[in-house]
Image (tube, rainbow, N blue to C red):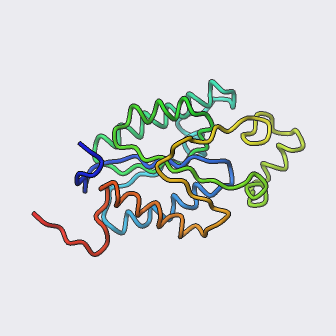
């Protein structure tokens, strides 16, 4: 099916990637609420929650991070194939596993949630950046470990330049554009 064909009611995976503190979870929560209000079957897979439940025991080595992303992708694919809108908010720092997940999930929308490192550090309520800068946390993405930004995401939001609701609205508009959501005010037809 081409991207411009109607897909109302089909599952999709909406994958938010970006540094810790960029705003992935905040935007994902707003989008999730909007989707629920529109009657979309939706499941949210937040990186922190998945790591605690699905990927418990994994370290922050590159291999384990890749494994974590692939596990999230496996679950997202199962849900998507069964008509669920899946929202993933995970740092997913490396391009190769993100691209592998994209290849596996036909209905995949990648959103790069972007903010400068210093802005992410300012927003950090958990104190992770402070610990990373002091050396208490090794292999911290953006500080002591790399983040490979997507070269061609479906949507690139700059959370240092717009409010979370504005970014979330752009995500909703992208889902409408791709045909996963009926635009507001458009009547169903048979």
In the picture shown, does residue 117 fall above or below 80?
A: below
Towards the viewer: 76 or 111? 111
Which residue is nearer to you in this view: 71 or 22? 22
The residue most toward the top is: 63
Identify the image quadrant of the N terminus: top left
Placement of 14 over or under 67, stated as above or below: below
Residue at 46% across, 36% down: 73
Give the x, y percent position of residue 34.
41, 67
Residue lying farthest right?
134
Q: How many marks?
A: 0
Q: Quadrant of residue 95?
A: top right
Q: Which of these two is toward me, 95 or 15?
A: 95
Residue 38 image position (x, y, % from top left): 33, 67
Q: Which quadrant does the C terminus fall into?
A: bottom left
Q: Residue at x 78, y 48 (%)?
A: 128
The residue shown at (62%, 58%) is 23
Residue 40: x and y in percent read 32, 59
Q: Going by the picture, which residue comes out furthest to the bottom?
A: 185
In which image quadrant can residue 35 be found?
Answer: bottom left
Expressed as whole percent of the image width and height from the top left, the position of residue 50 reads: 54, 42
Residue 55 horizontal side relative to residue 170, left or right? right
Question: On the picture, is 161 further left or further right than 155?
Answer: right
């Amino acid at each position: 099916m081409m991207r411009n064909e109607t897909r109302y009611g089909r599952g999709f995976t909406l994958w938010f990637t970006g540094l810790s503190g960029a705003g992935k979870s905040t935007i994902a929560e707003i989008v999730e609420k909007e989707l629920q209000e529109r009657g979309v079957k939706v499941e949210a897979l937040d990186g922190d929650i998945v790591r605690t439940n699905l990927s418990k025991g994994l370290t922050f080595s590159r291999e384990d991070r890749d494994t974590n992303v692939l596990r999230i992708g496996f679950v997202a694919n199962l849900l998507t194939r069964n008509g669920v809108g899946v929202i993933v908010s995970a740092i997913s720092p490396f391009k190769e596993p993100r691209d592998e997940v994209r290849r596996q999930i036909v209905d995949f929308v990648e959103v790069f949630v972007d903010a400068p490192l210093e802005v992410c550090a300012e927003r950090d309520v958990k104190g992770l950046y402070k610990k990373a800068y002091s050396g208490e946390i090794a292999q911290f993405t953006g500080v002591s470990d790399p983040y490979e930004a997507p070269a061609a995401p479906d949507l690139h939001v700059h959370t240092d330049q717009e409010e979370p609701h504005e970014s979330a609205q752009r995500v909703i508009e992208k889902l409408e554009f791709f045909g996963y959501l009926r635009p507001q005010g458009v009547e169903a037809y048979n």
